[in-house]
Image (tube, rainbow, N blue to C red):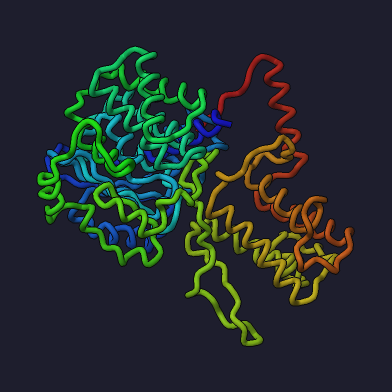
Amino acid sequence: MKKSKLLGVLLCSTCLAVSGTAMPAMADGMKVVTLGADLTDAQKNTMMKYFNVDSSQVQILTITNQDEREHLSAYVPLEQIGTRTVSCAYVKPTESGGIKVRTANLNWVTCNMIATSLSTSGVKNCEVVAACPFEVSGTGALTGIQMAYETATGEKLDDTKKQIATEEMVVTGNLADEIGKNDATTVINKAKMQVIADNVQDADDIYNIVVNIADQNNVGLSSDQIDEIVSLLQQIAQQDYNYDDVKETLERVDDNTSGDGEIGDVDAEDDATVDADEDDILNSVDESALGEDVIASSTQDPALEEETGMESDMIQTDIPEEMGDEIIDDPVYTEEEQTDSADGQMEDTLDTSMLTEDQLSMYNKLDTFCKGEYEGDAESLKTAMEDPDVVSTVILDAEPAATLTKTVEKIYLDILTQGTASYVPDGTEVYMTTELNMLDKSLKDIFGLNPEVQADPSLIDQTDEMRQTLYNDTMKFFEKLYGETVQTSETDAAEETEASEDGYVEEETE
């Protein structure tokens, strides 16, 4: 399991590849904003409002899913790369003050995880705001920030250090799954501090450092966890970091996570002077832009996590199995989009505002199909299936039809907005497309074809045969939508096997 998680975050940390050209360094002045290409124009404007800047004040880089694929395809299969890029970052290199980070709507990655990993990349001083207009895991933030930093300074970070920084985020994330974010960050950051400060190279010495720090902080670690941390720190030790370059950042993170810096204290007066800078991007954000209930964290204000409900590690800590910007918290329903139903009651309306133009077209086709298949609208069904002879064999009463429509549409909307990061293959897949396999399993649950799951309440009065028919018809629609059937998937798989046995596999081309 750990290997799959490691792959997942390696992908996440690598995914925010930036489209743009480097510009000359402008100390304490040059600022870069990265915007996810799959955000709507309104959402991009929201992020600019949150960052409190306009295009005349910063260089703007657009990060696309194609950028992600170009940077990831050498490491992982394309089907494991997410389909949406939505994370944003605002980066300002500075001359002093260490690395300062603020996050908003990132519910897995914290400001301290970003700061300490970014220091491993070779960044010494900068201010960073990493955010999204809605909640996402934030696992794609690190490399996007690295690339923005390189663009702002005109200097390329060392590739090896960037790779180690990515692994550091992975190891911290794996550990956080089991002991919590705060303890995970505390142990790794403290150990890193001591290894760099004392120039420790020997593996046994590093092992003892990790064990002692874990004991001192009442953190229980397994032998495998210790070995994983030691392996990471050995790589860090070989990079010959200057402790003075990372001191301020690592000690600030240590103060935030453990409450006591063991090697030295950051100069509070100097820190306050920098924080008072009117051009400090962390404190100049427009908090009202993202609305209420925003999960936030800041290396300069540790209490911010507690105030926004993030300090208890109650937010999901599982590292996404698939790369991309994983949307963890469901943003589907909004109070503003609730409308009066025919009987005067309020009913929830699914929020499609985050869909791209292509995604919205696919979702609307499903809506047309549901009207035809479940509600008996013959013309809608013919339109959706592009077949003038198709007929609905099972027509539900109005209320269960509307309920089933909402249930199916919500599942599909979740897949479109959240991507396929939550899907874990179990070997029973019948389609090449991950979305179809997700739909297949979910629909079997809805229609009561999984003996361990009760059918949706809207189908209680339907016979087994009717539910099977509705499932079959619904999957036929999705197969048509994605241009794939079980038969074509099996044929493709067979052809791939035959090609492999013949001693070659045709290379994919863009």
- The image quadrant that residue 40 belongs to is bottom left
Counting from the top left corner in percent of width and height, residue 467 is at: 83, 60
389 w.r.t. 205: above or below: below
From the top left corner, tell me how far across and down residue 107 is, in percent: 43, 51
Asked if residue 14 can be seen in this view, the reply is no
- What residue is drawn where x is 76% and y is 72%? 400
Please provide percent x and percent y for residue 10.
Answer: 45, 32
In depth, the one of 478 and 149 nearer the eye is: 149
| Residue at 36% from the left image edge and 19% from the top image edge | 206
> 5 or 435, which lies in front?
5
Q: Can you say whether 232 is above or below 307 in the image? A: above
Q: Is residue 98 above or below residue 457?
A: above
Q: Is residue 12 left or right of residue 148?
A: right
Please give left or right for residue 43 compared with residue 300 in the image: right
Residue at image coords 44%, 40%: 66
Q: In this rendering, would 164 be left or right of 420?
A: left
Q: Give the residue at x 26% y 63%.
A: 286
- The quadrant in which residue 49 appears is bottom left
Residue 69: give x, y in percent of width and height. 46, 36
Q: Nearer the viewer, residue 55 or 295?
A: 295
Q: Nearer the viewer, residue 207 or 283?
A: 207
- Residue 59 visible in rendering: yes
Is 357 left or right of 374, judged from the image as shown? Answer: left
Which quarter shows the N terminus? top right
Is the residue 376 above or below the residue 185 in the image?
Answer: below
Find the residue positioned furthest to the bottom: 344
- Number of marks present in the image shown: 0
